[in-house]
Image (cartoon, helix red, strand yellow):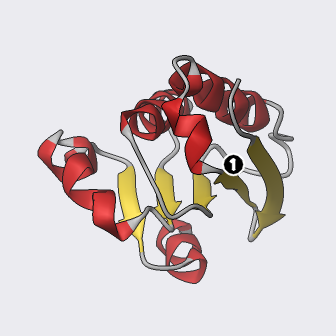
Amino acid sequence: MIGSIDVKSQVEDSVLILILSYNSDVLAGRESSQELADRLLETYGARNTKEVGSSCVIEIRSPVASSSLIRALFDLWKSVTASSGELRIVGYPKDYTDSLTSLGITSLKGFVLSQSREAALKSLRP
């Protein structure tokens, strides 16, 4: 693999927060989409379901995006919604949001771009 992927998790307000960091070289790799998805799904799947619900906030800390990231987020969304949860995305690179919109990803039920972690968490409160 080229570059590095870092996925950290924390819990806030009984919601799992995944913090995703990667460098732009990661997105150039052929297997980057699958590796990103695997790392996100592994971390999401390892959550303590007694401590957190099925909804998830993912905070992206990288200034670039590509189809690899979109596919990984779509795979995570499928897993989250299969568990009756919702996915909130914070920090998606603004220069790349048109790609999400044109593909129809932002219109999927339970897939929401949020302005901040606080806004994402607030939207998930009952």
Does residue 29 appear to the left or right of 52 in the view shown? left
In which quadrant of the rendered view does residue 58 lie? bottom right
Q: What is the quadrant of residue 94 in the picture?
A: bottom left
The x and y percentages for residue 25 are 59, 41
Q: Is residue 96 above or below residue 119?
A: above
Quadrant including the N terminus? top right
Give coordinates of residue 10: x percent, y percent: 83, 59
- Residue 46: image x %, image y %? 83, 32
What is the total number of numbered labels drawn onto the structure image? Answer: 1
Q: What residue type is disc 1 on?
A: Gly
Asked where in the image residue 78 lies, by quadrant, the reply is top left
- At label 1, counting other C-alpha atoms closer than 10 Å, the crowd grade (few under 14, some 14-19, many 20 or more) is some
81 is higher (above) or lower (below) than 6: above
SS class of the residue under badge 1?
loop
In this picture, is 48 found above or below 8? above
Q: Nearer the viewer, residue 107 or 72?
A: 72
Residue where numbered disc 1 is placed: 53
Residue plotted at (85% across, 44% down)? 50
Q: Which residue is outermost to the left?
A: 102
**Going by the image, does 103 lie left or right of 114?**
left
Look at 44% across and 62% down and name the residue there. 92
- Which residue corresponds to the image point at 29% horizontal and 45% vertical from the top-left? 109
- Name which residue lies at 74% across and 71% down: 13
Q: Is residue 43 above or below residue 18?
A: above
Q: Position of residue 11 (x, y in %)?
A: 81, 61
